[in-house]
């Protein structure tokens, strides 16, 4: 799996419609610098439609993302089931090409990688904890509160030393 695998060449479209499917695994995240996640097993489908000057991309992502619980560090499985729609306009105007959602008429290649990556990240629960995972269990150990208190206590004792 390499970055260019996610390029869609709209210039090659003979029919107006085409569908692309991708099996995303751990290599997918390795293509991203500082990726938020590193393991997954996802089926991605992109339905593309080309009209005169408009390209419509409908993404469907279903699968699992693996991470570790923020609280107890257990490995957790997160469900991904999401859709996204993107509309691109073809143009030869240089100014418009600097903006998002425009693609050059002369170079009708669009990389779907960032959209796929972004959609995965946005679909993840806000807190990566056992309760929000597929196993839906409570955290096995929860040291977080006591650990926080210890840190505060230490700082206070340092301050008290200074005052003396
Ligand atoms: Zn946990």
Image: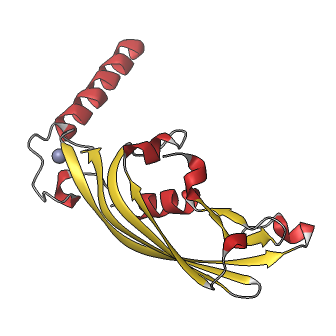
Residue located at (50% from left, 61% from top) = 116
148 vs 70, nearest the viewer = 70
Image position of 109 (left or right of 155): right
In the image shown, does 70 or 33 lie closer to the viewer? Answer: 33
Residue 126, image quadrant: bottom left
x, y percent for residue 120: 42, 60
Most distant residue in the front direction:
14
Asked if 4 appears above or below 132 in the picture, the reply is above
Image quarter of residue 102? bottom right
Horizontally, is 1 left or right of 6 in the view?
left
Residue 126 visible somewhere in the drawing: no
Q: Residue at x 26, y 57 (%)?
A: 78
Q: Position of residue 154 (x, y in %)?
A: 29, 22
Residue at position x 28%, y 48% from top? 66
- Near-viewer residue (15 or 120): 15
Q: Is residue 100 left or right of residue 69?
A: right
What colouring style does the render use? secondary structure
Q: Is residue 61 above or below residue 51?
A: above
Left or right, 93 with respect to 125, comes to right
**Picture quadrant where residue 79 is located:** bottom left
Q: Position of residue 53 (x, y in %)?
A: 77, 84
Give the number of marks. Answer: 0
**Residue at position x 49%, y 56% in the image:** 117
Q: Is residue 103 visible?
A: yes
Vertical side of 156 occupied by 10: above or below: below
In this rendered view, identify the residue nearer to me: 75 or 47.
47
Q: In what quadrant of the picture does the C terminus appear?
A: top left
């Amino acid at each position: 799996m390499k970055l260019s695998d996610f390029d869609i060449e709209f210039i090659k479209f003979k029919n107006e419609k085409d569908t692309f499917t991708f099996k995303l695994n751990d290599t997918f995240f390795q293509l991203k610098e500082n990726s938020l996640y590193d393991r997954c097993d996802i089926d991605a489908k992109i339905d593309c439609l080309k009209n005169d000057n408009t390209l419509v991309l409908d993404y469907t992502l279903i699968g699992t993302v693996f991470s570790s619980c923020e609280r107890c560090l257990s490995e957790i499985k997160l469900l991904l089931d999401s859709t996204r729609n993107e509309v691109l306009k073809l143009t030869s105007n240089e100014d418009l090409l600097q903006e998002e959602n425009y693609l050059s008429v002369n170079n009708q290649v669009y990389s779907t990688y960032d959209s796929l990556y972004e959609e995965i990240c946005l679909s993840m629960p806000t807190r990566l904890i056992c309760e929000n995972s597929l196993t839906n269990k409570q955290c096995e150990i929860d040291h977080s509160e006591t650990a926080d208190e210890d840190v505060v206590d230490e700082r206070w004792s340092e301050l008290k030393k200074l005052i003396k």
